[in-house]
Image (spheres, helix red, strand yellow):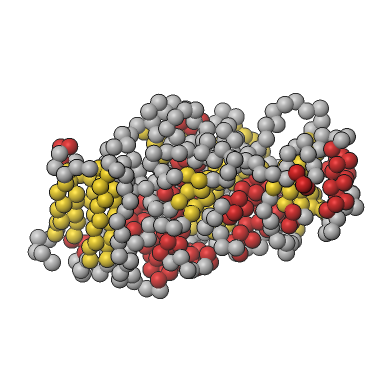
Amino acid sequence: MNSTILPCMVLCVWQSIDYSVCSQNRLLGSFLLSNNAINMYFNRLILSLLLATASTANEVPEEEISSSSLRRKAYVIPDESSVQEEPTRRVFVKYRKNMRSNFEAELRKRSSSTATRMHYDFRDMDTFVLTVPESDVAILKQNPTVESVHDDVKRYPMHIPDSVQQQQRNLQQAETVPYGVDLVQAKQAWGVGARGQGVKVCVMDTGVYDHEDLPPITGPAGTPFTDDGVGHGTHCAGTIAAPENGKGVVGVAPEADIYSVKVFSDDGSFAYSSGILAAAQECAAGGANIISMSLGGPLPNLFEILGFRNLLRNGVISVAAAGNFGNGLWSFPASYPGVVSVAAVDENKAKAPFSQFNRQVDVAAPGVDILSTLPMTAPCQICDQIDDFSYGTISGTSMACPHVAGVLALLASFKPEAEPADYIRAIEQSAEDLGAPGKDNEFGNGLVQAYAALEYLNGGPIKSAASPTTKTCGDDMLSFNLKLLTDNNASETTWELRSIVDNGETYLVGSDYENGADIIVRECIPKNCYVFTMYDSEGNGK
């Protein structure tokens, strides 16, 4: 977890940045900043963390200003494509203590004469989020009811569109385990009963499609949380929690629950920091233990800092992508204190060339050519040629982030009484060191390792796990349950479950076990006739 105190007020204009958005790929295009400009930027920031308490945010209908009219909406950026007579600016406006009614009166007056629109009311932070004419920003700063004005900065999905490769898969074929699941030791964690059960992970993204190979998706009532016109959120959700069901793929925490809060509209272009903050608070209100944010942007925001700090204090862990520019700049919210920043590696544990590197990186996880779920029906922006495709490989720190969210879900299911700081410390202290010895900018503490983190959390080796229970399966499936106690020659032991029909297709296999461990396997498999075989590679029965 990042512990660096971050700058909170930006007083400079980044005129030295060439910062563009590629409309064709809808990906943050270029971000060029000289070392001198970087130094100027950090030297011209004021460190001023405010000891304020974040609140639940309510979005206000644009046509109404009074606080009595507050109601929930989807946390999606509004359509601002219409031509406007005067340039506008979207800002956080913090009013002075005990001056809310005065400021509301000022807003009512302004709304009748200017193009002022209200988006959010962060009541406990004494703050509104408004769109105002550009010329009014200076006037607001001089208003006696206003304490400060801050830009509402943009956030973007952190994937590489050109990396998308669709794959047509028969859902009834044998389940595929993506390489990232093995690389983070997820299967070893399952073997001791840590499967994400009872843990809710909130995916703040483009929405999560109600896929056949995902758990039931929940989200805020009245919002389009299962609409995913991009495919990005559905892919991240599969990496976290695609269940072990004998088909498709499997996620890191196959028994975790997914809570979806849609923050990007279906063009997948960008969201605002105010929407990210409001969505994070909605995740907490929905009972999420962990928030997965495969998104980011180059500019910090004071109110996001406060919001994520308070979420952690209230027991919610936030995980975010470190960024895809391949440089040493910071990305937000990943680089905030209290947010776990995740860099990307490939299947050989080498740093992904696009992965940003800086001292705020906490851990690394697989993020290159990650196989996961995609929406099963068009339209879908990154899978708009899917036809019958419902899976695909994508690269980005967006793909690394949900691996870490899934590992944290495994830890929370293993020891639910622990504190968020315990889980974060466990993944940092148990990570596989890569690159320079110790914590470094490229990999942080190293490649996240689920089983090693469980042992750290356990205070030592895990000798046993809770007794297995029968996994609930559909009417057309069978429940397969196996408990295996390994000896001191566990590496010699493998097993397989093979169908008698279907050309002897292998449905399940097990290998690479630790010595002296209780292995628990619970799977749903198609109704059929099977042969279970266990092998001793040395042939000596030991």
The reply, left or right, for residue 442 in relation to residue 20 is left
- Tell me the quarter of the picture where residue 493 sits: bottom left
From the viewer's side, name the closer residue of 39 and 508.
508
The reply, left or right, for residue 372 in relation to residue 73 is left
The reply, left or right, for residue 223 in relation to residue 431 is right
From the viewer's side, name the closer residue of 5 and 284.
284
The x and y percentages for residue 289 are 52, 57
Question: What's the residue at 74%, 54% (across, down)?
Answer: 123
The x and y percentages for residue 176 are 31, 43
Question: What's the residue at 84%, 59% (across, down)?
Answer: 98
Q: Residue furthest bottom?
A: 459
From the viewer's side, name the closer residue of 429 and 313.
313
- Work out whether 521 lies above or below 524: below
Q: How many marks?
A: 0
Q: Residue furthest left?
A: 540
Instruction: Name the image quarter holding the C terminus.
Output: bottom left
Instruction: Name the image quarter holding the N terminus.
Output: bottom right
Question: What's the residue at 29%, 51% (across, down)?
Answer: 523
Query: Does any portion of residue 300 appear in the rendered image?
Result: no
Query: Does any portion of residue 4 appear in the rendered image?
Result: yes
Question: What's the residue at 39%, 34% (across, down)?
Answer: 390
The x and y percentages for residue 121 are 74, 48
From the viewer's side, name the closer residue of 503 and 137.
503
The x and y percentages for residue 528 are 19, 42
